[in-house]
């Protein structure tokens, strides 16, 4: 029976053991990371079948590359780099292109052949959504405090708001929330620098705040006071 | 549109990175979607199949049918070999080739090729000089070895020739032998030959005319007396002496001149003509050819 291990070094150890044929190590590694990775794909794609396919592809790549694995970085960074590449390949194959609109971290998702979300959220069922439209929406007055909303309702609004984010901003947000990564690690996974990641997160938080109707987070409000 | 960030944005970002923002709290309240159990089983089965292939154990066929395609993606592409055994197919353990085999095979091939090339260059005596440095070195070595081989071959041929000459050369002529007959005194030898020839002539005459001799003996006894008896005795003694001294010559007709006598006569002619050297050489040849002749024995034994 494997000892209880938690931590990045333990992940690398488990992966190294699996490379030598220890299946139990892989099972422990998989049980630890399967949920965050699956949600990373599910939130990005909005489609369960696509999430399943990408999720499976990532783990198969890890299994195939087990003998070449070197614990130079955190296993989480290694795994989400593979996930990022799979996601980019999927978007490329599905006809979506990501173009940078400026150096400020503002990205525009251009639809080439079909809508962004294969199963768009009812709130964006028109399929006319774009960052330009979002910017015009952002210029509208905020809906105002909705303190009366329950937690479930806020979560549902957050999920809907996440779907409206550009892929890079949403990816940065998800990597922080699901993989618990910092700016540097997110930059490594996405192939950018920390400032770009910081900018993307700022835009993402501003959009989510607007969608959720909060004026300011409680912690931040307290810090400002 | 302004790209600047307010202090509120920075504070919000700091709170978010510290997981203290309301957004993080709301995100935690989202439904925790998980992969399905089928997907989990498929991935774990694929991982197990890959680990088993690492351990070089044949993969089991007990995997569920729905998981086989996924496991096949990870498992080695080449199926394990099978052996037909009386209609039954038996799966053999998968044998994985070591990674070093291909580089080792390539290196061995290069070494063999270089070795063959060097050997060909060494065996070729007419190899031309290569323009490259390596070619020059090989050509120089080939020339040196070719010259050495040629010199060795010449030395061996010379030694064989000498051996053949020594073994198959003709024997030295007997003329130059140290124990050849020598004529110490030519004049004495000529006198001896002359005397012997006279005796031989007289003896020959006596043998050819036996009746005249007996008649001579009878007439001497009948017609003459006293003083004539002395001459008869001397004649008879001379005939007996000549008969006794004659060699055991074969019975030949009297008209045929013996080669021995002819050669002796020739020696006398040469000597009488003043060619003493030629007479000496002829006499020595005679002594060699008729070594057993009584005249030769007497000449050699003649001081």
Image (tube, coloured by chain):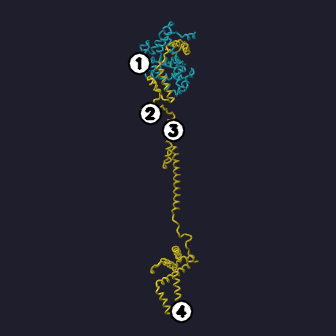
Chain colours: A cyan, B yellow
Do the dots labelled 3 and 1 sit on one chain?
Answer: no
Question: What kind of element bears circle 2?
Answer: strand
Query: Marks 1 and 2, how far apart in space?
Result: 53 Å
Looking at the image, which is closer to me, A110 or B283?
B283
Q: Dot 3, crowdedness within 10 Å: few (<14), some or many (≥20)?
A: few
Residue located beneath label 2 in the image: B83
Looking at the image, which is closer to me, B235 or A137?
B235
Question: What kind of element bears circle 3?
Answer: helix
- Mark 2, mark 4: which one is toward the viewer? 2
Q: Are marks 2 and 4 in contact (CB under 8 Å)?
A: no
Query: Marks 4 and 3, how far apart in space?
Result: 132 Å
Query: Marks 2 and 4, how far apart in space?
Result: 144 Å
Q: Is residue B19 visible?
A: yes
Query: Marks 3 and 1, how far apart in space?
Result: 55 Å
Q: Chain of mark 2?
A: B
Question: What kind of element bears circle 1?
Answer: loop
Residue located beneath label 4 in the image: B227
Q: Dot 1, crowdedness within 10 Å: few (<14), some or many (≥20)?
A: few
Q: Are marks 4 and 1 in contact (CB under 8 Å)?
A: no
Residue located beneath label 1 in the image: A114
């Amino acid at each position: 029976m494997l000892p209880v291990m938690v931590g990045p070094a333990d992940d690398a150890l488990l992966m190294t053991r699996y490379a030598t044929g220890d299946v139990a190590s892989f099972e422990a590694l998989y049980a630890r990371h399967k949920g965050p990775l699956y949600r990373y794909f599910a939130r990005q794609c909005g489609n369960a079948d696509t999430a399943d396919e990408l999720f499976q592809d990532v783990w198969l790549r890890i299994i195939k590359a087990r003998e070449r694995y070197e614990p130079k970085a955190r296993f989480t960074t290694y795994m989400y780099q593979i996930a990022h590449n799979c996601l980019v390949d999927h978007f490329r194959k599905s006809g979506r292109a990501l173009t940078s609109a400026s150096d400020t971290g503002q990205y525009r998702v251009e639809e080439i052949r079909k809508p962004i979300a294969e199963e768009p959220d009812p709130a964006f069922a028109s399929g006319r959504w774009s960052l330009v439209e979002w910017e015009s929406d952002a210029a509208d007055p905020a809906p105002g405090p909705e303190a009366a909303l329950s937690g479930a309702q806020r979560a549902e609004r957050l999920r809907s708001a996440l779907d409206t984010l550009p892929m890079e901003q949403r990816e940065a947000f998800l990597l922080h929330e699901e993989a618990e990564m910092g700016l540097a690690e997110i930059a490594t996974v996405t192939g950018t620098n920390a400032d770009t990641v910081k900018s993307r997160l700022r835009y993402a938080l501003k959009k989510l705040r607007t969608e959720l109707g909060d004026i300011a987070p409680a912690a931040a409000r307290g810090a400002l006071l | 549109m302004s790209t600047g960030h307010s202090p509120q944005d920075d504070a919000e970002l700091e709170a978010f990175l510290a997981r203290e923002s309301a957004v993080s709290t709301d995100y935690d309240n989202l439904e925790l979607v998980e992969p399905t159990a089928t997907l989990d089983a498929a991935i774990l089965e694929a991982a197990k199949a890959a680990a088993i292939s690492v351990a070089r154990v044949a993969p089991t066929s007990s995997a569920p049918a729905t998981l086989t395609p996924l496991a096949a993606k990870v498992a080695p592409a080449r199926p394990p070999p099978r052996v037909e055994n009386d209609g039954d197919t038996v799966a053999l353990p998968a044998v994985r080739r070591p990674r070093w085999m291909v580089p080792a095979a390539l290196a061995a091939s290069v070494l063999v090729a270089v070795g063959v090339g060097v050997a060909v260059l060494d065996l070729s005596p007419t190899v031309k000089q290569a323009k490259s440095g390596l070619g020059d070195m090989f050509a120089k070595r080939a020339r040196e070895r070719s010259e050495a081989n040629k010199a060795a071959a010449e030395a061996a041929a010379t030694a064989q020739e000498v051996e053949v000459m020594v073994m198959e050369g003709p024997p030295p002529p007997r003329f130059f032998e140290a124990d050849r007959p020598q004529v110490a005194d030519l004049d004495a030898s000529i006198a001896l030959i002359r005397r012997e020839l006279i005796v031989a002539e007289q003896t020959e005459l006596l043998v050819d005319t036996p009746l005249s001799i007996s008649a001579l003996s009878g007439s001497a006894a009948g017609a003459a007396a006293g003083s004539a008896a002395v001459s008869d005795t001397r004649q008879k003694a001379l005939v007996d002496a000549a008969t006794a001294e004659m060699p055991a010559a074969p019975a030949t007709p009297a008209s045929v001149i013996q080669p021995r006598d002819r050669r002796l006569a020739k020696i006398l002619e040469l000597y009488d003509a003043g060619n003493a050297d030629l007479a000496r050489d002829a006499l020595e040849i005679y002594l060699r050819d008729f070594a057993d002749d009584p005249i030769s024995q007497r000449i050699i034994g003649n001081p």
